[in-house]
Every structure is written in C-alpha cells, then in structure tokens.
Image (cartoon, helix red, strand yellow):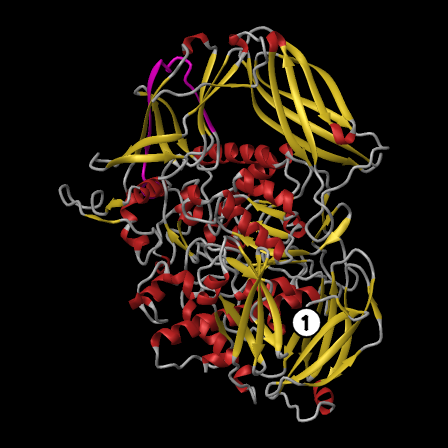
C-alpha cells in the first residue's frame, strides 16, 4: 500500500532536508503461522489472538496437530467457557507479521532513518527487505532500529516472533548454574511455565484470577522516522519545589539524536501563559546523543495551584509549550499539561510504638491512601480502549478512592491511563513488572531490564499521579519466607541476585532519572528497616514497618482481631463470583451450577470455591433451592454479600486505626484492597466485574472510603463507635445511634450524642456502651432480633453514610421476613429514578438490571424504612421500558 508522509513540526519555508518525517506503519498487516498453513490479515497495534478472533474463524488444530488435520470452528469469545485451554496452541506456535509498503520520497536523501517500535510482544527478529535489522526480547521497552542503508522505495517488513512459552522454557533450560523458581504456576491455574525468564506481562502465563493467554504481536505504535540534522527522541519535565526559597522550579529534559557533523545552534522557548512564563534559552547541540536541560524558575509572587489527590483538592494543571527553533529553520514543538505537587514518604519514630511510621505526604499534608490494586483490564491489550479506561477509573473516584497500586505482574499502563489518573486525582503506587518469583541476572536479562526501566521512568515521571516507584510485587517476601523451598545453601546467591536486580540496577536507574518521588524495593517491605538490613528483611511482614499484604480465608472475617494493625496495608481481600449476567455471556446452561466443570475451571485459587462457602456459612444460610439455576444465582449473590461484608469489616478496622496505638501497633495510613478490576469473567477478589459492572463490594467501598465515616465494632460485649475523618479542617457534628428490629419497619429506639468536634485527618472514639445496656433500653430487642445503625450529622444534615453493626450472625436473625420490594421507575434527564417500597426490613438489598451498563447511586444496602429512592446512572443510552424488563431485586431472605 502507499503510505502517507507526515511532516512533523516543519516550519513554513524550511527546506525539505531539514524536516523530520514520520511514516506510520499502523493499520493492516498480514500474519501467518509457523508452517504457513494459516494466513490472515491483522491489525497493528494488536496481537495474533485478536487477529484470529476478528477473522471469525480459528483453525484450532493447525499448529498443534500433524499436517493435514486442520479443523475450523465458529468464532467465539476468547473467554468463552474453556477457550483458554482450547486455544493454547496459538501461544505455542511461531507467528510472523508482514507488511509491504511504498514510500513517496527517496530515503537515500536522509542522513538517518529509524524504524521505531513503541512496543513489541515479545521475542522477535525484525527484517527489512530480507535483511535482519534487530531483535527484541522485552514487551516493556521501545526499540529503534537504524534502517538508513536498508530502506528502499518499495519495502517488505517482517517481524518473526518466537513462541513466548517455548522461549521462556529454553531460557530456563540454559540457566544451569542454579534453579530460579518457581518453575510453573499451580495446576489449578492452567498456566505456562518459566514466565520469570521472559520480560513479558507476567500474568499472561496464568494467575490465580486470570487465564493463560501468552500473546504475540506489535502491541503499540510502529513508525519510520527520517531526519537529516537532528531528531527529538524524548521530552520530559519535572516540577521541583525549593523548600529553602519556598518557590517552584521546572526542570525540562529533552534528548536529541544529532546526526549533523556541524554544531547545531538555536533557541528553546518555554511558555506557560497562566503563570506568566515566557523564557528563551540559547542551545547548542553537538553530534551524537545529546540531552538539553532547561530550568524554569517561577516567580515567588506568582501563585501556583498545586495538584491534589481526589477528595483533597483540585487537580489544577497548566498548559505548557516548549519550542526548539534550530539552524536551517528546523523546529520542534511539544505541548503538555504541567502539574505541581510534592510527595514525601515519611518513616519516623512513633510515640509509644517500636518501629517507624510509613505514610505519604502530598504537598506537606499526610494523606490516608484509600483504594485498590489495578491489574490489566484485558488479556489482549489492544482491546483496552479509552472508553474502558475512563469507565474503570471514573468508578475509582466515584467510590471515594484516591489511590491505585499498578501491580507488578501486569503492564506499565498506556499513556492515557496515567493522563486520566492525573485528571481524576488518583495517586499511583507504580510497581515495576516483577511479581511472585525470583529472576535471573545474566547479562542479556539485565541489559534488557536496564533499557526497560530507563524507558519507563522517562515516559512516566512527568505524571503527578505517580507518587512512588516499587521494585516488585512480593519478591522480598517470597525469598526471605521460603515460598519456593529453595535449598539453604543457595540463599546467598538469591540474595545477591535480588540486590543486583532491584537495588544496583533498577533503584540506581530510578534515582538517576527521577529524584521527585520515593523508591521502595518491594511490596510488602519494611521500608527503612529493609534498607538497614541489607535490602532484605527476615520478616518483610513486620507490622511496625512499611507495608503488608494480608490474606486469611479461614478465620471469621467478622472478627476484627483477625486483621493486622499495620502501618500500611497494600493488599488484602476476599473472593466473590461475578453476577450471573456477566457469567452468562461466556457460559452455557450446563455450566450454571456451583459444582459444574466450568465453575471449577474458572476458579484459579486452590480450594477457592469452598473457602467462599466457608465464609458464607459462618454467618449466613447456604442456598438450598431445588431449582439448580436459582440456587446458583443465590450462591453468586451470597459470595458478593460475603466479600463486601468481609472487606468492609477489614477496611473499617484500618481506617479507625489511623490515629491510635494499641499494644504498640497502629497508625495505619493506607488501605488498598485486592483487587479493583477483572481481566475476565471469573471468581476473583475484584470489586468491578469484567466490563465494569459494580459488585456489591464496590458499592460498599463508596461508603467505607467516605471522607467522614462512623465505624462500629464490639469488644467483650462493649459497642465502640469511632469517627474517621479525611477532611482538612475540624468538623463539629453529632452521632446518632438507632436500633431496628428485623420484624418491623418501625424504629425501636434512638439516641444522639452531644455535639463534638472531630479533628482534621484523625480517627477518634466517639461512643461506648455495653450491648446489654443498649438493648435494655430498646423494648423487645435481643441480639438476634435487632440491628444497630448509626451516622454523623450536623443541624439535621447527614455528613456520613449510615453505617450498621450486626449484633449476631444473620443466619440466627429472629423475625427476618422475606421482603416484597417493588420499584417505580421514572426518568430525570439522563438519570433514572428507582422509588423503592418494601414490606419488611431487608438486609443486602441488591438491585440488578442485568447487562444494561451503568451503576446505581447505592446498592447492597440495609433497608430499614418503608421507602427509599435510588438513582441509576446509565453508561449507554437505555430506556425506562428496558430497565423495567431487566430489573430484578434480591435481599437476603430471598435466598432461604
């Protein structure tokens, strides 16, 4: 095909020889399998799997079976039923991408012509006109190949991929000096082996919440760049606050490839109109790779609005343009949004407690991080659209979260992800992509990692949303706590490898490239203590230091004593199943039971389905309907009830631990539950289903992450209620405590405190009363027959969510009736109003509209009044009649 030349940043009247030309190679390519038996078109960016699915046929046996046995089957969703097993052959084959293209101009007139890949997945040899021009082995870095003497008027480019599964196995086999564990994931995950030997999305070989789909393809932009004088390769900037002068400065770094043998002179003009900045610098560029550093000092008299996390202020940014005008009329122009903020990781002694604090200050203010952990939104990155990212990240802030941890087994997310986080005020804890494994440190591997880290720091460091870098996920814990039964005699070898990879290399590169945010070697880690102990602590889960990960699926999750009173909890959670409407799309009728082959296949955590039933059975009755489908739906619902209640109890424990030290433990300053989103339709720890539908947990998160929250719990028959505040100012309010009976919609009793003040950014005890004394004042109430609710208000205005405390397990509740809940639906603009009526008190009221995309203003709630109004916010156009047809409501007693 004939390609269009894009003349980038060329000035009017400039000679053609001084221009920089960019030629996009995106779009239509062809691919073929290793033996050539399968040939089809493919889109770039994209992957082989997507090409096969989009073609609407798949030759399931071509690559895996002997020649001549090629069966075609109808196209199905890659996530349908057992397709992750049926399509395993795709990853075991070697695929080739081919594109033929013509060029308008004679490339021999250019001093330098590069072929640039922003992302290749993963192991490939690149040929241009049958000439090998480079190799790739890392999904996470940019590759630029010099094709000055290879490119012609008519060209054929080939990217010959090797199976990532075969490559990883070969690399492991060649590493004969010692074992680098783990070899393979647990069999229940249906995954591939030796993922730690390939720089690729680690979860693509399988994980306990996702399928194994090791992709191949050109997953990001690809283009040709031609130039004669020089080219701007990288453009970065860093706002820096001068604590001594109390002023802001801006450091701008621009990396040029200068091919001219002559000195290139010119000017760099920086403009930030809203800050009255117009600065011109003279620059000179000599031959070779050159970096230009510009420093912009912002006048102290100018008020600079800072960037704040969601819930703490505005996300103010300033439009900046930087223009380089060079000899011969060559001109480069970059525009960007500049945000000003400071970040500090505070590790200092705490009174009455051993160890050190571990929390983040943004713009000098201690911030409690409220949020979750982000995993890849799809196994196939070309399916992660702008709309999908916007939907998922908007759901983050809609649930009162201010932080996400980008987990180290996925990918460094696309630019738009971080731009949206900047815009929405979502703080990012950014892992480097190493997870749950030890890694080799041979020269080839380390060289590749160095390029990866250098590229990612350059690409991402200008984003204010990223508040910390973290070297890996759980690898310090894996090594020091003996996850892989490694031989003790090799411990020092593994320690040396660990320090080489994460400290001597990754940490060094990060600190050289970015001094504006902290670097943490691992998560979990003991922070400063880990450093003092030579970068690895014997117990990385020490509650007096750093962050911890915590999981316990056996102990009763309603018992707050189960949870660690740690400084910062960056992973914790419980599984649930997605809703039936989500599962229905990728299953058949025979799959719709909790013990089906499909249900077992979809569960990638050993004994995970039974552990969910165990937690349910502690406090609820298991469904016993003789109708298999109803029993299945009821079980799905109860897993979400259990998950929401468990994570609620745990998160509220962390929030009330913010300001207190008990037995030397406390000052918790972060709660990031595992996990935010799903990669496919399966049981997982997520609060958002694949496609973005809110689970009950996400609605609960909107409450337990509220800026003001009353938290109730019991200790030895004593009811305690704390108030947790994320506000920036002290607030006067009162606490109201109410008692309802399960058998009546009439309020039994209520009491309110005198007005009090909750100080900004603190958690404080507001109320104590023995439960027997509380119930004594409420006629006819026992632990089994009544429930307590409470809220914060001022002058009759509600300041917090209405929270509740169960006085007994709901399986023992007395007087709980099946509620007849009806809804009258009306429309107000783009929003739909659900006016609910109930015949009885109803816990865990779940409103569902099937596959109609959108969310409710509240869901999964305790309904103690006869009427309640809930709003539905559709994500796509719908109608009142569609909602009425799809609407279904469930409450707890419906499952009996």
Mark 1 crowdedness (10 Å alpha carbons): few <14, some 14-19, many ≥20: some
Residue at which label 1 appears: 802
Q: Which quarter of the picture shows residue 622?
A: bottom left
Q: Which quarter of the picture shows residue 99?
A: top left
Regarding residue 605, the answer to whether it shows in the image is no
Label 1 sits on a secondary structure element that is loop
878 sits left or right of 529 in the view = left
Tell me what residue is drawn at x 77 percent, y 74 percent.
735
Q: Is residue 639 above or below residue 247?
A: below
Tell me what residue is drawn at x 74 percent, y 59 percent.
726
Residue 451 placement (x, y as % from top left): 51, 32
- Say which of 637 and 83 sits in front: 637
Quarter that holds the C terminus: bottom left
Regarding residue 794, the answer to whether it shows in the image is yes
Residue 619 placement (x, y as % from top left): 53, 80
345 sits left or right of 288 in the view = right
Q: In this view, does 101 lie above or below 416?
A: above
- Say which of 523 and 721 sits in front: 721
Residue at the extreme bottom of the image, as rendered? 780
Residue 306 placement (x, y as % from top left): 75, 41
User: What's drawn in magenta, residue-wise?
Assistant: 143-166
**Residue 160 on the magenta span:** yes
Tell me what residue is drawn at x 66 percent, y 34 percent.
337
- Say which of 517 and 836 sits in front: 836
């Amino acid at each position: 095909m004939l390609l269009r030349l894009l003349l980038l940043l060329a000035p009017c009247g400039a000679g053609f020889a001084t221009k920089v030309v960019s030629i996009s190679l995106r779009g239509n390519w062809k691919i073929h399998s290793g033996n050539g038996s399968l040939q089809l078109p493919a889109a770039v960016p994209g992957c082989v799997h997507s090409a096969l699915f989009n073609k609407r046929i798949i030759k399931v046996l071509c690559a895996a079976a002997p020649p001549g046995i090629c069966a075609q089957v109808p196209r199905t969703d890659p996530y349908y039923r057992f397709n992750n097993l049926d399509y395993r052959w795709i990853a075991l084959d070697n695929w080739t991408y081919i594109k033929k293209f013509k060029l308008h101009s004679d490339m021999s007139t250019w001093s330098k012509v590069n072929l640039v890949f922003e992302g290749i997945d993963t192991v490939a040899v690149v040929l241009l006109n049958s000439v090998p021009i480079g190799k790739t082995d890392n999904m996470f870095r940019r590759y630029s190949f010099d094709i000055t003497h290879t490119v012609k008027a008519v060209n054929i480019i080939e990217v010959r991929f090797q199976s990532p599964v075969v490559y990883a196995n070969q690399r492991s086999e060649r590493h004969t000096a010692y074992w680098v564990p783990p070899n393979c994931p647990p069999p229940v995950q249906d995954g591939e082996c030796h993922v730690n030997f390939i720089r690729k999305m680690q979860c693509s070989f399988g994980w306990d919440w996702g399928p194994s789909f090791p992709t191949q393809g050109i997953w990001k932009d690809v283009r040709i760049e031609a130039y004669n004088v020089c080219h701007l390769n990288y453009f970065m900037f860093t706002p820096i606050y001068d604590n001594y002068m109390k002023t802001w400065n801006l450091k701008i770094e621009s990396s040029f490839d200068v091919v001219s043998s002559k000195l290139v002179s010119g000017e760099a003009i920086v403009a930030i109109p809203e800050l009255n900045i117009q600065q011109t610098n003279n620059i000179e560029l000599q031959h070779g790779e050159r970096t230009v550093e510009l420093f912009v000092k912002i006048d102290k008299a100018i008020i600079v609005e800072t960037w704040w996390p969601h819930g703490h202020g505005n996300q103010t940014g300033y439009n900046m343009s930087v223009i380089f005008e060079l000899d011969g009329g060559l001109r480069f122009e970059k525009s960007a949004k500049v945000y000003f903020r400071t970040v500090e990781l505070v590790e200092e002694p705490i009174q009455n407690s051993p160890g050190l604090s571990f929390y983040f200050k943004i713009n000098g203010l201690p911030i409690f991080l409220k949020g979750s952990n982000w995993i890849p939104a799809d196994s196939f990155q070309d399916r992660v659209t702008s709309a999908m990212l916007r939907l998922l990240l908007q759901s983050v802030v809609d649930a009162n979260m201010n932080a996400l941890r980008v987990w180290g087994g996925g990918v460094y997310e696309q630019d738009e992800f971080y731009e949206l986080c900047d815009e929405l005020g979502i703080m990012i804890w950014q892992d480097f992509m190493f997870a749950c494994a030890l890694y080799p440190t041979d020269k080839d591997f380390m060289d590749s990692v160095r390029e990866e880290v250098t590229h990612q720091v350059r690409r991402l460091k200008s984003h204010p949303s990223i508040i910390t870098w973290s070297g890996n996920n759980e690898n310090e814990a894996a090594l020091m706590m003996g996850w892989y039964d490694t031989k003790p005699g090799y411990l020092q070898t593994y320690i040396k490898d660990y320090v080489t990879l994460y400290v001597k290399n990754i940490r060094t590169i990060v600190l050289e490239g970015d001094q504006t945010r902290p670097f943490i070697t691992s998560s979990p880690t003991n922070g400063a203590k880990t450093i003092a102990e030579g970068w690895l602590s014997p117990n990385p889960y020490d509650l007096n230091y750093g962050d911890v990960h915590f999981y316990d699926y056996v102990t009763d999750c309603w018992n707050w004593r189960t949870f660690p009173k740690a400084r910062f909890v960056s992973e914790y959670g419980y599984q649930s199943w997605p809703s039936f409407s989500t599962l229905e799309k990728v299953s058949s009728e025979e799959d719709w039971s909790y013990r089906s082959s499909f249900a077992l296949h979809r569960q990638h955590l050993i004994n995970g389905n039974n552990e969910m039933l165990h937690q349910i059975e502690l406090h609820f009755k298991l469904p016993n309907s003789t109708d298999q489908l109803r029993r299945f739906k009821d079980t799905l619902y109860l897993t979400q009830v259990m998950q929401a209640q468990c994570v609620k109890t745990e998160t509220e424990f962390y929030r009330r631990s913010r300001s207190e030290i008990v037995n030397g433990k406390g000052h918790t300053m972060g709660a990031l539950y595992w996990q935010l989103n799903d990669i496919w339709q399966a049981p997982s720890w997520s609060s958002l289903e694949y496609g973005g539908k809110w689970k009950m947990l996400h609605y609960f998160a909107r409450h337990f992450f509220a800026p003001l929250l009353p938290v109730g719990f019991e200790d030895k028959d004593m009811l305690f209620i704390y108030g947790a505040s994320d506000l920036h100012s002290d607030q006067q309010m009162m606490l109201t405590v109410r008692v309802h009976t399960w058998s009546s919609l009439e309020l039994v009793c209520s009491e309110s405190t005198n007005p009090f003040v909750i100080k900004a950014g603190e958690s404080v005890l507001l109320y104590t009363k023995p439960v027997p004394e509380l119930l004594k004042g409420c006629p006819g109430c026992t632990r089994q027959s009544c429930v307590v609710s409470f809220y914060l208000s001022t002058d009759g205005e509600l300041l917090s969510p209405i929270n509740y405390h169960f006085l007994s397990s709901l399986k023992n509740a007395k007087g709980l009736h099946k509620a007849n809940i009806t809804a009258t639906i009306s429309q107000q603009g783009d929003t739909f109003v659900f006016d609910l009526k109930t015949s009885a008190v109803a816990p865990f009221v779940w409103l569902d509209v099937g596959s109609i995309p959108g969310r409710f203003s509240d869901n999964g709630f305790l309904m103690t009044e006869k009427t309640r109004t809930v709003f539905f916010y559709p994500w796509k156009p719908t109608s009142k009649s569609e909602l009425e047809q799809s609407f279904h409501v469930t409450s707890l007693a419906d499952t009996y």
